Image (cartoon, rainbow, N blue to C red):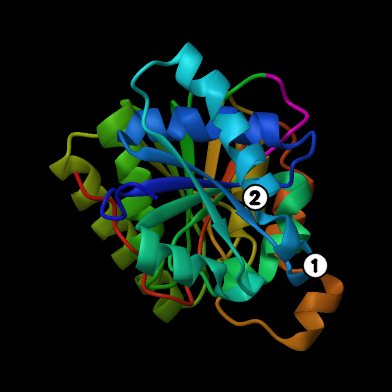
Amino acid sequence: MKDVKEQKIAVPLSFGDSDRNAILNGIKIASIFRKELCLLYNYNKKEEADIEHLSARLEEYTLPIKNEIPGFPVSTLLVSEQISELPDKLADDYEVILFVVPFSGYKHYSKALAESPVPFLFINENNNHISLFKNVILSIDQRKENSDSSLWTSYFGRFNDSKIIVLAANDTSKEESNLVGKNIYQVKKLFQKFRIPHKIYKGEKSSLGNTFESLELALSSNCDLLIILGSSNITPLDWVVGLPERKIIDNAGAIPVLIVNPRKDNYILCD
């Protein structure tokens, strides 16, 4: 890695068919935020003897990018980490601020996401259309960690001139409703500060169903990015029956889904 101080958009590769769209979306995101693209491969012990070949394969992936987009910052990285520890390691040591992963990689990276201090952007690798990330829907519920997902949403407004639709949960109890109201107040304050075009709507479902209602709105509109918080509390049973975010990704169609982990303090994007 040439410069570990440069913030990076990471695309973990599998050396399979899903890599192409992940890389193209990674290029788009890195261009929006003016960050370096990092193509990485997390090898296992059985592959240790083949490191030189793996490194060469990674470099081959950078050649079309360098030819098509001269001057575009792209680097490669070979690591060997436990999957759950990968985001922490890359965020701390290599300034990775976002992972771009195909929908089909959710199962593999789900436990990494649950321990990650940076968001994961999941994209449909079978969709040949690369999102412009111009029309964003943000799901807001009663949790205080909505400040992290709101901040990431603001980055798209600030650096990509994206229009934002905020869907607020409709909780019935006074206490929960007040918590949602406080979050909406902070969202509005943040977006007004940066003059980000936005509309705020009150949904029909409570905080428990708000992300699914947000997905329904995304699918019925011209949305090209859905931003949600991941699960705050995860039990062993959740890994068996499936977390809500997995169900969101399974039904998101062509819409990219950015998931912010509420279980960790999130890194921020440097201007």
Residue at 44% in and 61% down: 118
Mark 2 surroundings: few (<14), some (14-19) or many (≥20) residues within 10 A: few
Q: Mark 2 is on which residue type?
A: Glu
Determine the residue located farthest toward the left in the rendered image.
193
Task: Answer whether residue 256 is magenta in the image.
Answer: no
Q: Nearer the viewer, residue 118 or 158?
A: 118
Indicate whether 253 appears above or below 266: above
Q: Position of residue 27 (x, y in %)?
A: 48, 29
Q: Residue at x 75, y 35 (%)?
A: 253
- How far across and down, in percent of the image, does residue 172 sit? 52, 71
In magenta segment, residue 126:
yes
In this view, which residue lies farthest toward the bottom? 236
Q: Between residues 122 and 224, which one lies in front from this camera angle?
A: 122
Q: What is the quadrant of the C terminus in the image?
A: top left
The segment highlighted magenta reads: 123-128
User: Helix or strand or loop: what does disc 1 sit on?
Assistant: helix
Task: Choose between 178 and 8: the one closer to the eye.
Answer: 8
Residue reaching furthest right? 240
Picture layout, residue 187 above or below residue 102: below
The dot on residue 222 is none
Q: Which mark is residue 46?
A: 1
* Residue at 28% over, 48% down: 6
Quick one: SS at disc 2? helix
- Which residue position is annotated with label 2? 52
Give 100 or 201, whichever is nearer the viewer: 100
The answer to whether residue 217 is visible is: no
